[in-house]
Image (spheres, rainbow, N blue to C red):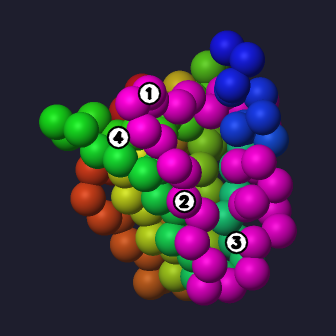
Amino acid sequence: MGRERPVRLRFQKALKYYAPNQIILFAVTDNKITVNTTTPLTANRGPVLIDGGTCINGTPGLTIDGNGLTGNGLVLGAGIQLRNLTIKGFTGRNLVALAGGGNKIGTCVVVRR
């Protein structure tokens, strides 16, 4: 529980301030990390790779959990790549792609209620 707050804040800041063509990478080793968010997350500053770090037996290393948050979850602008993530728990759509295209859903991405 103590690890989740700092990780969540860094993830939200990374989405808000990244420069185009960067990689947002989570160094997940033995444990999975869950980002519990209280606000929708938007990646709309240009191309970026968001990588949860690991995928063990089909289970991504990073989970973004809306915990019933009203609205959509991860909202993608153009040119966003995802891998090694689980996105769940939002009352709207868990994953939304805005107009512009070029998004890529890579290996080990799970989107569920």
Q: Residues within 10 Å of mark 2 (few under 14, many from 20)?
A: some
Q: Is residue 44 magenta?
A: no
Residue visible at 68% across and 26% down? Answer: 4
Q: Is residue 43 above or below residue 68?
A: below
Tag 3 near tag 4, CB within 8 Å: no
Q: Give the residues drawn in magenta, as a range.
A: 10-39
Q: Determine which residue is flagged by label 1.
A: 31
Q: In the image, what residue type sits under mark 1?
A: Asn
Give the x, y percent position of residue 79: 52, 81
Q: CA distance from mark 1 to mark 3?
A: 29 Å
- Residue 82, which numbered label? none
Residue 69: quadrant of the picture: top right
Q: In the image, what residue type sits under mark 4?
A: Pro
Q: Determine which residue is flagged by label 4.
A: 60
Q: Earlier in the sequence, mark 3 or mark 2?
A: 2
Give the x, y percent position of residue 113: 42, 27
Give the x, y percent position of residue 7: 70, 38
